[in-house]
Image (cartoon, grey):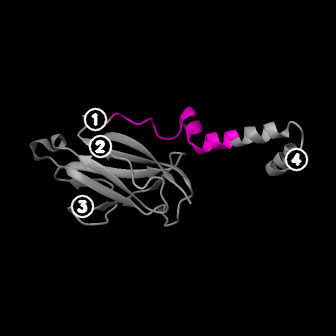
C-alpha cells in the first residue's frame, strides 16, 4: 500500500485521525526547515552582523511571487584605507543546496551582474534582485529559502518565503 493509501485508509479508522494529524505535523516541521537545523543541515543560525561593517536587510516583498529585492548596506568602516570590499549573495533551499545568485542593481561596474565576488568601492545602500528562478532558469517551488551574504569573509543569513 502506498503512503497516501495508508493515510486515506487510516483516516477512516477511529484512531486514524491521529495518524493524519501526526503526518501533517511532520510535513509542517520539515517544510519550515526545523528538521534540517536539528540534523545539522541547512544554514547556520543568523550571525550577529552589527559592527561587521555591513547589514543584510529583509527582502521585500516577503513572502513574494515571483520576484524580490534584497537590500543591504555597506558602512564606511569596511572601506578603511581606500580598500575595496568583496560582496557575494547566494540563495539556498532548506537542504542547504545552492539555488541561485541574485543580480546587483545599480552596481558601479554594471547593472545586472550576478552578485558573486563583486568589488564595491564605496559605502552606501545597495540592492540585489532575484527573479525567483534557479540556476537553470526554472521557477522555484513555494517554500523557505535562505539568503547568504558574504562580505570580506564575514557572513550573514536571512530567511525569505516564496509563495504561489
Query: Along the polypeptide, which appears first: circle 3 or circle 2?
Result: 2
Q: Are the residues flagged by discs 2 and 1 in contact, CB closer than 8 Å?
A: yes
In the rendered view, does 85 fall on the left or right side of 18? left
Q: Residue at x 30, y 56 (%)?
A: 127
Q: Secondary structure at mark 4?
A: helix
Query: Along the polypeptide, which appears first: circle 2 or circle 1?
Result: 1
Q: Quadrant of residue 15?
A: top right
Residue 29 belongs to magenta span: yes
In the rendered view, does 70 fall on the left or right side of 44? left
Query: Along the polypeptide, which appears first: circle 4 or circle 2?
Result: 4
Q: Distance of mark 4 from mark 2, alpha carbons?
A: 51 Å
As drawn, the label of residue 9 is: 4
Q: Secondary structure at mark 2?
A: strand
Residue picked out by circle 3: 107
Horizontal and vertical percent position of residue 85: 21, 48
Magenta residues, as a range? 25-48
As drawn, the label of residue 87 is: none
- Residue sitting nearer the eye, 91 or 97: 91
Q: Residue at x 19, y 42 (%)?
A: 78
The residue sitting at the left extreme is 81
Q: Secondary structure at mark 3?
A: loop
Q: Are the residues flagged by discs 1 and 4 in contact, CB closer than 8 Å?
A: no
Q: Are the residues flagged by discs 4 and 2 in contact, CB closer than 8 Å?
A: no
Q: Residue at x 56, y 56 (%)?
A: 142
Residue picked out by circle 2: 55
Amino acid at each position: 500500500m502506498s503512503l497516501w493509501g495508508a493515510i486515506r485508509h487510516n483516516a477512516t479508522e477511529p484512531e486514524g485521525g491521529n495518524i493524519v494529524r501526526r503526518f501533517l505535523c511532520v510535513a509542517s516541521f520539515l517544510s519550515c526547515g526545523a528538521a534540517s537545523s536539528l540534523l545539522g543541515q541547512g544554514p547556520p543560525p543568523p550571525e550577529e552582523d552589527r559592527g561587521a561593517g555591513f547589514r543584510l536587510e529583509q527582502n521585500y516583498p516577503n513572502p513574494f511571487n515571483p520576484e524580490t529585492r534584497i537590500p543591504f548596506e555597506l558602512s564606511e568602516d569596511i572601506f578603511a584605507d581606500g580598500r575595496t570590499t568583496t560582496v557575494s549573495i547566494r540563495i539556498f533551499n532548506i537542504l542547504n543546496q545552492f539555488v541561485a545568485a541574485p543580480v546587483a542593481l545599480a552596481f558601479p561596474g554594471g547593472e545586472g551582474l550576478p552578485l558573486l565576488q563583486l568589488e564595491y568601492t564605496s559605502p552606501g545602500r545597495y540592492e540585489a534582485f532575484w527573479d525567483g528562478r534557479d540556476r537553470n532558469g526554472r521557477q522555484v517551488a513555494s517554500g523557505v529559502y535562505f539568503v547568504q551574504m558574504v562580505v570580506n569573509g564575514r557572513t550573514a543569513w536571512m530567511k525569505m518565503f516564496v509563495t504561489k
